[in-house]
Image (spheres, rainbow, N blue to C red):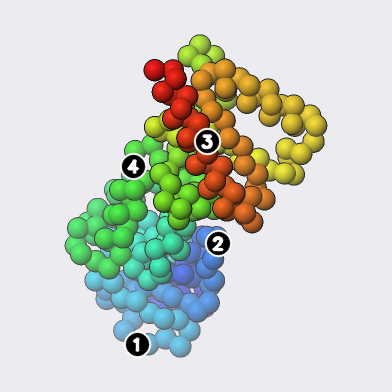
Amino acid sequence: MLAVLDCGPSTYLSHGSAAALWDLPGFALEPHHVIIERGGRETPSDRAAVHRPRHLPEPFGTLLHGIPVVRPALLVLQLCATVNRQRAERALDTAWAKRLLSGPSLRRELDPLLHRGRAGTALLRELLDDRGPGYVPPASGLEARFESILAQAGEPPLRRQVDVGDGEHWCGRVDYVDPQQPLIVEIDSERYHAALVDARADADRTARLEAAGYVVERVTDRQVWHRPSDVVAAVRRARADARHLSRVAA
């Protein structure tokens, strides 16, 4: 608040400082960054790095905890222009998972800027194009880590959080489904899936999914965090099994 007040009226917390205020992991409030609308104070500030954008969407600012701050849509554009792709992508997915924004809301709010050649717009357009209609952002760091492992290994992406059934009955919502093959991948937490009762429930769920025509591969959170090569090998093996199952069924 001191940084905003020091710069006078028409000042809003921005960039990494705004990301921290919106509670996006990996960002800190300091050093403070603010934007000032055109016509605002022109003198430097010793409390914040001052940015004076020439064009702003409408609306672009709001109040959070009583502090003037840029809205999440503009914040993501700022991050696309100032941090590396991975950090910007993670911030976008986290804000989306927290329901601070969505793909459609980003395009709607930033439409006046997305075609001006402004810094960050090319990357943001690319990230939005990658997340097509129906995109569901990772609900956890575990899912984000799993998807990153597959991407780095050159494996095609899987669809997240999908309801599946056998044509007559709903079998449940699964963690991941291959869009091309009858393959389901579940990520099991060792904390919540180690007990005997959990193992029995998992076995029953797997049996129902296999009866519905799917290959089911299960990996653990420990593998995702500490043994990524095991995860890649498991997914590749399961994809080969799913392709074989498809050929047999045909």
Which of marks 1 and 2 precedes in the sequence?
2
N-terminal label among 3 and 4: 4
Q: Nearer the viewer, mark 3 or mark 1?
A: 3
- Residue that badge 2 annotates: 25
Mark 2 vs mark 3, foreground winner is 3
Residue 123 at x, y percent in the picture: 31, 60
Alpha carbon separation for disc pair 2 and 3 = 33 Å
Residue 162 seen in the figure: no
- What residue sits right under mark 3 in the picture? 238
Q: Closer to the camera: disc 4 or disc 1?
A: 4
Q: Earlier in the sequence, mark 4 or mark 1?
A: 1
Q: Amino acid at mark 4?
A: Gly
Residue visible at 26% across and 60% down in the picture: 122
- Residue 29 appears anywhere in the view: yes
Q: Compare marks 3 and 1 and give the one earlier in the sequence.
A: 1
Q: Are marks 3 and 1 in contact (CB under 8 Å)?
A: no
> 113 or 54: which is nearer to us?
113
Q: Nearer the viewer, mark 2 or mark 4?
A: 4
